[in-house]
């Protein structure tokens, strides 16, 4: 076994045994979640088939829960519109000026 002489050789020797990280899409994550929740196949078997760890499944379950709670917390009806603070202050000044003009006109 030879010892790497420079940094490039050292990086190559470490990177050869390293797996490329897999990025799952949202559809695939949800499919894995549903399959694990179904219960007819052990979760370990599904994770081995997909090349995932149990921590990955925990993370997927947490993401599904967060998204579901966020979606379920939305109240029905038309959402209230907000105005930016600088626009609000400008509208407030205009309304105040209009109120002064109206009160002077009523005198």
Image (cartoon, rainbow, N blue to C red):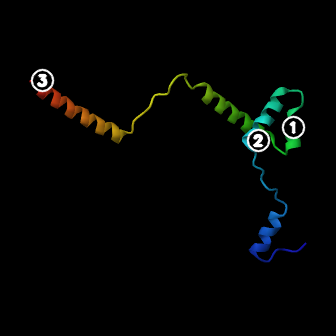
Q: Secondary structure at mark 2?
A: helix
Which callout, 2 or 3, points at the residue further toward the start of the chain? 2
Observer-nearest of 59 and 99: 99
Give the number of callouts.
3
Is label 2 in contact with label 3 (beta carbons under 8 Å)? Answer: no
Q: Name the quadrant containing residue 107.
A: top left
Residue under label 2, please give it. 56
Residue occupying the far front of the picture: 105
Q: Is residue 7 above or below residue 36?
A: below
Asked if residue 66 lies left or right of residue 20, the reply is left
Asked if residue 36 lies left or right of residue 82, the reply is right
The residue positioned 17% from the left and 27% from the top of the image is 102
Which callout, 2 or 1, points at the residue further toward the start of the chain? 1
Residue under label 1, please give it. 46
Residue 52: x %, y % from top left: 82, 44
Observer-nearest of 20 and 58: 20
Q: Secondary structure at mark 1?
A: helix
The residue positioned 85% from the left and 60% from the top of the image is 17
Observer-nearest of 56 and 89: 89
Looking at the rendered image, the disc whose residue lies closer to the viewer, 2 or 1, is: 1
Residue occupying the far top of the picture: 76
Residue under label 3, please give it. 106
Is label 3 in contact with label 1 (beta carbons under 8 Å)? Answer: no
């Amino acid at each position: 076994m030879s010892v790497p002489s420079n940094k490039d050789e050292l990086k190559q020797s470490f990177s050869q045994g390293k797996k490329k990280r897999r990025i799952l899409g949202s559809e695939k994550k949800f499919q894995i979640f549903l399959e694990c929740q179904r219960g007819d196949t052990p979760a370990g078997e599904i994770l081995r088939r997909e090349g995932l760890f149990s921590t990955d499944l925990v993370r997927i379950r947490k993401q599904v829960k967060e998204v579901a709670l966020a979606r379920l917390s939305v109240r029905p009806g038309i959402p209230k519109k907000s105005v930016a603070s600088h626009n609000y202050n400008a509208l407030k000044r205009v309304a105040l000026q209009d109120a002064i003009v109206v009160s002077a006109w009523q005198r």
